[in-house]
């Protein structure tokens, strides 16, 4: 069956941190088999317990991968939302429906977001890494973050429905394919979503977002390999290539 011309696919590994080193290794093994260099979404201090600069060997490995052509994106700072008394619908959607309290940038004020970006950039710099993009944890961010990213020179970011080049004020619709494993229901529904949504690639670019937690489940390991096989030959290593 023909679904029309196939548009480019970008592959990324989220939550890159020494906290998930074995799972990241497995995801990299899968991506190597199709000849793709996934973007690495690096969390400077995952959940406040895994500061990059306390793990020099892990940083050295990331530097080697960046030199080999993997893009590095800043992925929040803690990748964890702070405790807050605010419990409106927007909070419930970002912190309970979309994520399990991981939408770090959704609850920050503009000054707090800028400070968090500065902290993250500084830690990446100490690790010898340069960020070519920023992606908010859980893809949850306010519209006001885009001009902030533009001022800071970021040329790539994304949310659930779009990819952006803040520096050039570009935006394009894109489908994201990712799994959720917090509950059996989410796991199965996310598998169904990816099997169906991948056909949107006939019209818009697609993004395969691999989370290290996916690697803990045999079904998601299988589905990840299937998605990568489906994308093989049509992948791009740079997120900005999705605009072409």
Image (cartoon, helix red, strand yellow):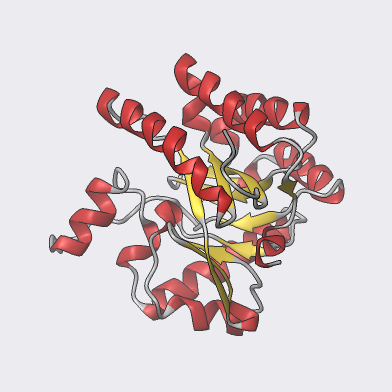
Residue 113, horizontal then vertical, whole percent: 43, 72
Residue 213, horizontal then vertical, whole percent: 47, 30
* Residue appearing at x 66%, y 61% in the figure: 242
Of residues 201 and 181, the one drawn nearer to the viewer in this rendering: 201
Residue 22 position (above or below residue 218): below
Corner quadrant of residue 150: bottom right
Residue 150 position (above or below residue 113): below
Q: Residue furthest front?
A: 1
Quarter placement of the N terminus? top right
Viewer can see residue 43: no
Residue 81, horizontal then vertical, whole percent: 33, 54
Quarter placement of the C terminus? bottom right
Q: Is residue 71 left or right of residue 145?
A: right
* Residue appearing at x 18%, y 55% in the figure: 92
Viewer can see residue 203: yes
Q: Is residue 215 left or right of residue 37?
A: left
* Residue appearing at x 56%, y 76% in the figure: 149
Q: Residue furthest top?
A: 218
Of residues 226 and 66, the one drawn nearer to the viewer in this rendering: 226
Corner quadrant of residue 82: bottom left
Residue 93, horizontal then vertical, whole percent: 23, 55
Of residues 106 and 139, the one drawn nearer to the viewer in this rendering: 139
* Residue appearing at x 59%, y 25% in the figure: 226
Q: Please tell me how many numbered marks the rendered image carries.
A: 0
Of residues 28 and 126, the one drawn nearer to the viewer in this rendering: 28
Residue 13 position (above or below residue 161): above
């Amino acid at each position: 069956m023909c679904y029309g011309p196939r548009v480019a696919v970008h592959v990324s590994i989220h939550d890159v941190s020494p906290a998930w080193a074995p799972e990241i290794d497995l995801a990299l093994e899968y991506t190597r088999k199709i000849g793709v260099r996934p973007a690495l979404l690096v969390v400077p201090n995952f959940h406040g317990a895994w500061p990059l600069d306390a793990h020099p060997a892990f940083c050295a490995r990331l530097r080697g991968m960046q030199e080999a052509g993997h893009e590095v994106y800043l992925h929040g700072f803690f990748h964890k939302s702070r405790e807050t008394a605010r419990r409106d619908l927007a909070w419930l959607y970002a912190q309970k429906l979309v994520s399990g309290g991981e939408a770090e940038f959704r609850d920050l004020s503009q000054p707090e977001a800028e400070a968090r970006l500065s902290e993250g950039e500084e830690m990446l710099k100490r690790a010898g890494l340069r960020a070519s993009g920023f992606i908010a944890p859980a893809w949850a961010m306010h519209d006001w973050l885009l001009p902030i990213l533009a001022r800071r020179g970021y040329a790539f970011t994304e949310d659930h429905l779009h990819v952006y080049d803040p520096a050039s004020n570009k935006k394009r619709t894109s489908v994201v394919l990712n799994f959720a494993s917090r509950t059996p229901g989410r796991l199965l529904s996310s598998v169904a979503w990816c099997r169906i949504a991948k056909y949107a690639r006939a019209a818009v670019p697609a993004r395969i977002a691999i989370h290290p937690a996916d690697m803990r489940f045999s079904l998601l390991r299988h589905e990840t390999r299937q998605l990568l096989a489906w994308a093989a030959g049509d992948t791009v290593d740079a997120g900005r290539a999705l605009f072409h």
